[in-house]
Image (cartoon, rainbow, N blue to C red):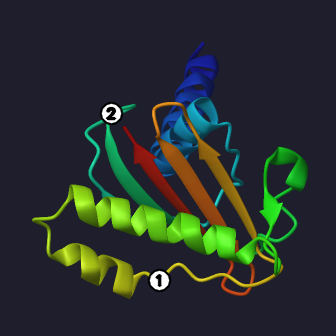
């Protein structure tokens, strides 16, 4: 009886510890999958650069930077990822500028937003990938991968 109890306590403690350690990823992954259909692999780190939302799924903006050991093979075009090339480079730039402009316009009184984008530049090149989805209420998500830096930049605008 004591052996069974110890096993259950150990397993339960392990599961609780796993959820606590991975909560940020589990929460974000679930939200992105449910709202946007965006599936991202588990990163080694998630940094929240900007967050003006007050819960799931409230209005506001978010900007996350996810770090990986190797990202290039994880993002598949069949999952909605589009390769950045000469033809799509301007489209990605337009989406990124729109996000920055929208954030500045809605948060006019917040001076540190300029610093946020300067200190956390979204960089990408040809052969990287992006994911963009626009909803009927003008909410959108933009995710841009950077293979050279092994990063994924995810920006959400939710109305």
Task: Bin the neighbour count of mark 1 within 10 Å (Cα to Cα): few under 14, some 14-19, many 20 and up.
Answer: few
Q: Distance between the Cα atoms at labels 1 and 2?
A: 25 Å
Task: Bin the neighbour count of mark 2 within 10 Å (Cα to Cα): few under 14, some 14-19, many 20 and up.
Answer: few
Q: Identify the residue at horizontal 37%, vertical 79% (top origin).
A: 117
Residue at the extreme top of the image, as rendered: 1
Which mark, residue 4? none
Does residue 140 show up?
yes
Position of 72 compared to 42: left or right? right
From the image, tell me which residue sits under label 1.
Answer: 121
State the quadrant of the C terminus.
top left
Label 1 SS: loop
State the quadrant of the N terminus.
top right
Q: Identify the residue at horizontal 61%, vertical 67% (top origin).
A: 44
Report x, y in % for residue 8.
59, 23
- Looking at the image, is 159 positioned above or below residue 64? above
- Looking at the image, is 152 positioned above or below residue 75? below
Label 2 SS: loop
The image quadrant that residue 47 belongs to is bottom left
Q: Please name whichever residue, 56 or 135, is drawn nearer the observer in this view of the structure.
A: 135
Q: Identify the residue at horizontal 32%, vertical 61% (top origin).
A: 103
Which mark, residue 58? 2
Report x, y in % for residue 43.
63, 62
């Amino acid at each position: 009886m004591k052996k069974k109890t110890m096993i259950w306590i150990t397993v339960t403690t392990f599961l609780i510890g796993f959820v606590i350690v991975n909560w940020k990823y589990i929460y974000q992954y679930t939200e992105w999958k449910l709202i946007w259909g965006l599936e991202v692999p588990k990163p080694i780190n998630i940094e929240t650069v900007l967050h003006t939302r007050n819960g799931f799924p409230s209005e506001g903006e978010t900007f996350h930077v996810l770090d990986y050991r190797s990202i290039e093979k994880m993002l598949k075009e069949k999952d909605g990822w589009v390769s950045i090339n000469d033809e799509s480079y301007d489209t990605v730039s337009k989406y990124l500028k729109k996000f920055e402009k929208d954030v500045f316009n809605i948060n006019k009184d917040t001076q540190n937003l300029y610093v946020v984008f300067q200190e956390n530049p979204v960089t990408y090149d040809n052969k990287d990938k992006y994911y963009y989805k626009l909803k009927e209420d003008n909410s959108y998500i933009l995710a841009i991968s950077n293979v050279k830096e092994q990063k994924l930049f995810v920006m959400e605008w939710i109305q």
